[in-house]
Image: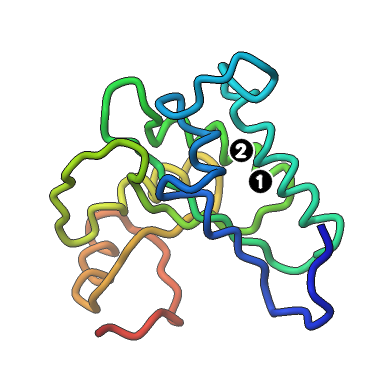
Amino acid sequence: MKLLAAQPPMAWLSQTAHGYLLNEFLSPLANKRTDEYGGSHENRYRIVREVIDAVRSEWTGPLFVRVSTTDYVEGGNTPEDFVIFGKWMKEQGVDLIDCSSGGIAMVKVGTYPNYQVPAAELLRKEVWAAAGLVDTDLSFLSLLELYGTEISERRMPTR
């Protein structure tokens, strides 16, 4: 895999979530393979490992990966599965995991402010740097109070 000549300030694997191909390999709900790409955590992660290795062979700058930390149904991935995957990503030189959720199982998820933050907090504690959806200044303040989460002064503008 060759990256384009114009090097961006960071590389972002944003389609490792939300039911896209790499997410389908990671999820035991979608991945029913019986070869070296299915079954165990290590096997389901294999293609993601190969993609990260390919990117890292061409790119030495910051690398972010977006993941769906839960499938929301029994038998699917949970945030604890992503502690395992996250440790491997860290070993491969991934700089940040962007925590999202869902995309494999067709379930209605009730969203509320900061609903993805607990999974991001688990990965931050167990692995290292992780980010979850935070959408308002009040959310930032409540996260500091509830979790003691380190929050960057630079953040996306609120809508």
Residue placed most toward the observer, 152 or 71: 71
**Residue under numbered circle 1:** 90
117 left or right, relative to 47: left
Quadrant of the image occupied by residue 137: bottom left
Q: Quadrant of the N terminus?
A: bottom right
- The residue at the point 49 percent across, 37 percent down is 24
Q: Residue at x 39, y 80 (%)?
A: 156
Is residue 105 positioned above or below 143 on the image?
Answer: above
The reply to whether discs 2 and 1 touch (Cβ–Cβ < 8 Å) is yes
The 10 Å Cα crowd at callout 1, few under 14, some 14 to 19, many 20 or more, is some
Taking the image as shown, residue 13 lies to the left or right of residue 101, namely right
Q: Is disc 1 placed on a helix, strand or loop?
A: helix
Helix, strand or loop at label 2? It is helix
Q: How many marks?
A: 2
Estimate how packed mark 2 is, as few (under 14), some (14 to 19) or many (20 or more) residues with alpha carbons within 10 Å.
some
Q: Which numbered marker is on residue 42?
A: none
How far across and how far down the image is residue 119, in percent? 36, 45
In the drawing, does residue 156 fall left or right of residue 73?
right
In the rendered structure, find residue 87 and report the number of the disc placed on it.
2
85 is higher (above) or lower (below) than 54: above
Does the rendering let one see residue 26? yes
Residue 42 in view here: no
- At 67% across and 67% down in the image, what residue appears? 11
Q: Quadrant of residue 28?
A: top left
Amino acid marked by disc 2: Lys
Color theme of the render? rainbow
Q: Nearer the viewer, residue 96 or 37?
A: 37
List x then y, in percent, for residue 72.
27, 35
Residue 80, horizontal then vertical, whole percent: 42, 31
Could you tell me the amino acid type at mark 1? Lys
Residue at 77% across, 79% down: 7
